[in-house]
Amino acid sequence: MQRFKAAITCIFSIFALFAGATNKAIAAPKEIVVTQLDNTISLTDDAVRIKNKTGNFILVAKAPDWKITCFRTDRKVYWQTDLNRFTGLMLLNSCVPPHDPVEATFLGPKKYKGYDCLCYKSRKGMIVYGAKNIKVSSKVAELLCRYLFMPNIKEVPLFESSSKAETYQHKDWFDAHRYKDFMQRTPVTTISIATKTYDPKDFVVPAGLKKMSQPTDVSYSDANKSDLEGMIEGVGFMGKDK
C-alpha cells in the first residue's frame, strides 16, 4: 500500500512539473508585429515601436512614462515629447499644435481580411476597424490613435474607410495639390499580423543621438526635405513672377 501511494504521489508530481513547464511556455513574453502600408508596428503590453517606411524614422514609447522618442540612425538624431502632447501630424508639420483624438461611436463587430474587429465611426464620418483579439493597454491604444490620426478607440487600428488611392499628374510649376498630398500620410491598411518572441532590443533607443528641437528635423527623410524645399522654391518663384 505504501508503495502504491508513493507511486501515485510520484505521478502527480510529474504532472505538476509538466503543467508548470507548460504554463511557463504559454506565459513566455510575446511581441505582436502589425505590418501596414507605411508602418511596421511592434507592440507588447508596456512598449511600442513603429518603423515608418517613407520617412525612414523609428518611434519608441514604453512604460512607465510613455514618453515619445522619434529617432533615425542615418543622421543620428532624435526628438522627444510627452504622450499627451503628441499627434502624428506633428511629424509632418511642426506647426500643428498637440490635440487629443476625437471621440468615436461604436457600431458593432466586423471582419477585416479575416480578422475579428470592432467597428467605430467618428463625427466626421471616418470608419475605423480595431483589432478585437489583440489585447493592449490603454496607453498603447492611445499612442497608436495619436500617431495614426485615428479617433479614440481602445484597440489597435487596422483600417480606416477614408483610405483611397489618388492619382497625381506631374506639373512643371508649383502645384498646391502636390503639396497637399505631401503633407498627408499614407492611409491605414493592414497587410499582416504576426507574433514573435519578445526582444527587448526592439524597444531600445540608441545612445549617442543628437536631440533636435523640431519633430520634422527627424521625421523628414532627405528625399522628403528635398521635395519640400523644391516646393518652397516654387512658391517663391511664382510670387515674383508678375
Image: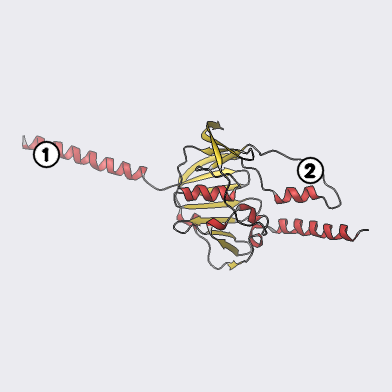
Q: Which residue is mark 1?
A: 6
Q: Residue at x 55, y 68 (%)?
A: 208
Question: Residue 94, image x and y in percent?
Answer: 66, 59
- Can residue 114 be seen in this snapshot? no
Label 2 CA crowd tier, 10 Å (few <14, some 14–19, many 20+): few
Q: Quadrant of residue 95?
A: bottom right
Label 1 CA crowd tier, 10 Å (few <14, some 14–19, many 20+): few
Asked if the residue under mark 1 is in contact with the one under mark 2, i.e. CB atoms within 8 Å, the reply is: no
User: Gap in Å between the C-alphas at discs 2 and 1?
Assistant: 80 Å
> Which residue type does callout 1 highlight?
Ala
Q: Which mark is residue 20?
A: none
Question: Residue 195, image x and y in percent?
Answer: 47, 43
- Can residue 181 be seen in this snapshot? yes
Q: Quadrant of the N terminus?
A: top left
Q: Is residue 53 above or below residue 216?
A: above
Q: Residue at x 60, y 47 (%)?
A: 148
Relative to the observer, which residue lies in front, 147 or 194? Answer: 147
Q: Residue at x 53, y 66 (%)?
A: 207
> Which residue type does callout 2 highlight?
Tyr
Q: Quadrant of the C terminus?
A: bottom right
Q: Is residue 146 above or below residue 216?
A: above
View extreme (right): residue: 242
Q: Quadrant of residue 122?
A: top right
Q: Residue at x 47, y 59 (%)?
A: 65
> For the residues carrying marks 2 and 1, which lies nearer the camera in this image?
2
Q: Which residue is mark 2?
A: 168
Question: Residue 32, image x and y in percent?
Answer: 48, 45
The mark that comes first in sequence, 2 or 1, is 1
Please, what secondary structure does the residue beneath circle 2 have? loop
Left or right of 175 on screen, residue 46: left
